Image: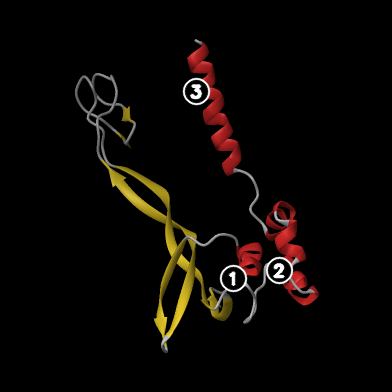
Amino acid sequence: MKKIALTFAAAVAVMLSSCVSNTPQTRIERNPQLFNALSAKDRQLVSQGLIREGLTKDGVFLAWGAPDTTSVGRKGGREIEEWTYLGHRAVRTMNMNVGMGWGFPYGGCGPWGWGGYGPWGWGGPGWGTDVIYVPYTAGVVTFRSGRVTEWQAARR
């Protein structure tokens, strides 16, 4: 019983930690040394979740958070690093299912549809909608020598 309670507590802790807000303000509060190292102009931008060319990696982290992916390479004979940020758009889809119904002798309603035949009910067609989340590239930041050289973000 104690093991079940500990497992449950751990699961709740993981769920609650995923609910913690991840905004520029929370990142600034957790990393005041990074924030204070920025210029006054950059502190103002970062507080609003904005970035600019010339901003440091720390400034981008505070403004936009940790990237979803990073890559390194060369461009124009110089090393570059690219941070990619993903977003997710909700997309509604429509579906049709046919499945088993439940125990009416000559008809009934099944979990996947209305109508049914036979002792267990053969479910007729059921219509429904689902929501799926489709990833997209929300932003890309390119760094040379630890500073932003170019960036782009999806329109909000």
Q: Secondary structure at mark 3?
A: helix
Q: Residues within 10 Å of mark 3 (few under 14, many from 20)?
A: few
Q: Residues within 10 Å of mark 1 (few under 14, many from 20)?
A: few
Disc 3 marks a residue whose amino acid type is Thr
Q: Residue furthest top?
A: 1
Q: Quadrant of residue 125?
A: top left
The residue that label 2 is drawn on is: 46
The residue that label 3 is drawn on is: 7
Q: Secondary structure at mark 1?
A: loop
Q: Position of residue 144 (x, y in %)?
A: 52, 80
Q: Is residue 105 left or right of residue 2?
A: left
Q: Residue furthest bottom?
A: 76
The first of marks 2 and 1 along the sequence is 2
Q: Position of residue 43 (x, y in %)?
A: 76, 70
The first of marks 3 and 2 along the sequence is 3
Quadrant of the snapshot with the C terminus: bottom right
Disc 1 marks a residue whose amino acid type is Arg
Residue shown at 28%/19% (left/top)?
103
The residue that label 1 is drawn on is: 156
Q: Mark 3 and 2 residues: CB-CB less than 8 Å, in contact?
A: no
The first of marks 3 and 1 along the sequence is 3
Image height of 69 relative to 127, above or below: below
Disc 2 marks a residue whose amino acid type is Val
Residue shown at 32%/36% (left/top)?
112
Image height of 2 relative to 20, above or below: above
Q: Quadrant of residue 91?
A: bottom left
Q: Nearer the viewer, mark 3 or mark 1?
A: 3
Residue shown at 73%/73% (left/top)?
45
Q: Secondary structure at mark 2?
A: helix
| CA distance separating discs 3 and 1 | 40 Å
